[in-house]
Every structure is written in C-alpha cells, then in structure tokens.
Amino acid sequence: MTRIAGVVIPAEKQVHIALTYIYGIGRKYSRDILAEANVEPTTRVKDLTEAEEQRIRETVDKNYMVEGDKQRMVTNNIKRLKDINAYRGLRHKAGLPVNGQRTRTNARTRKGRAIAVGGAQPKSASKT
C-alpha cells in the first residue's frame, strides 16, 4: 500500500499510470516527476523500493500543487468568475457549457436530463 500526497495508489499498475490517480497529476506531470525522482516509469508500484517511494513523495510535495490545494484553487477561481459576473462565471451559475460548445443539441452532461416541452399528452377528442 503506497500512499503519496494522501492518496493510496494502486499497487498492480506501473508507476507512471498509478501517479495519475492523484488529483492534479496527469500523464505528463507523472513522467516529469519520475524523471526528477530518477525512477523507471514502467516499474510496478509494488516493486518500488522505500527510497524510490520517498523520492517521489518529496518531489510531489516540493514542486506540485495536488489534491485539496488544487481543488481549492479551482473552486476559488470559479467563485471569482461568478462574483465579478464574467461571462464564464454566468455560464457556471446557469449550469451551461463554459467554453463555447453548442447547446442546441448535446451538452446533456452540463444541462442535465432533457425535459419534454410539447406533445407530451395525447390529443383529446374535439367536438365536431
């Protein structure tokens, strides 16, 4: 059980993939961290020595903003956009796509489940 930045990373995966389980570390940063810590990227996490784990831990703590700090920063940035009523902030408030995507179709992830507007009830018989 290897814990880095407060996250237990999977033991069966290669180190360069396992590091991406930490919020704020993607594949590029993962490779950079391993190069700086002088660790072979294809090594399995369970095969790491204690010294290698410690070097990775120190590199992440020293040079990268991860987990809670990173999430707090992103949340504060979104809050700032909302407070100053920037266009992107208004899109965040409305729960719509922020980066210019189309909304006539698609955008279901941001907008939620579609609500039918017309034609929901069968037509009633009219007098003739």
Image (cartoon, rainbow, N blue to C red):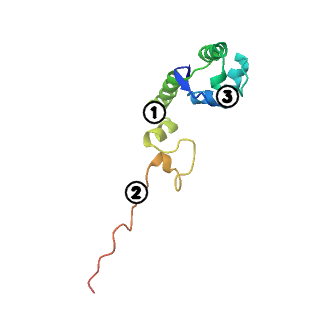
Q: Secondary structure at mark 2?
A: loop
- Find residue 99 and report its horizontal and vertical position in percent: 57, 42
Mark pair 1, 2: CA separation: 26 Å
Residue 64: name its quadrant: top right
The amino acid marked with disc number 2 is Ile
Q: Is residue 44 left or right of residue 103?
A: right
Instruction: Using a 10 Å C-alpha cutoff, classify the residue at mark 1 as few (fewer than 14 neighbours), some (14 to 19) or many (20 or more).
Output: some
Q: Earlier in the sequence, mark 1 or mark 3?
A: 3
Looking at the image, which residue is at 66% across and 12% down? 51
Looking at the image, which residue is at 53% across and 53% down? 106
Q: Considering the image in quadrants, where does the C terminus appear? A: bottom left
The foreground one among 38 and 25 is 38
Disc number for residue 16: 3
Total number of numbered discs in the rendering: 3
The amino acid marked with disc number 1 is Lys
| Residue carrying label 1 | 82
The amino acid marked with disc number 3 is His
Looking at the image, which residue is at 53% across and 41% down? 98
The foreground one among 111 and 19 is 19
Mark pair 1, 3: CA separation: 36 Å
> Eyeballing the image, is 10 above or below 4?
below
- Find residue 77 and report its horizontal and vertical position in percent: 51, 28
| Residue carrying label 2 | 115
Mark pair 3, 2: CA separation: 43 Å
Q: Considering the image in quadrants, where does the N terminus appear? A: top right
- Find residue 50 and report its horizontal and vertical position in percent: 63, 14
Q: Earlier in the sequence, mark 3 or mark 2?
A: 3
CB atoms at circles 1 and 3 under 8 Å apart? no
Camera-side mark, 1 or 3? 3
Residue 5: name its quadrant: top right
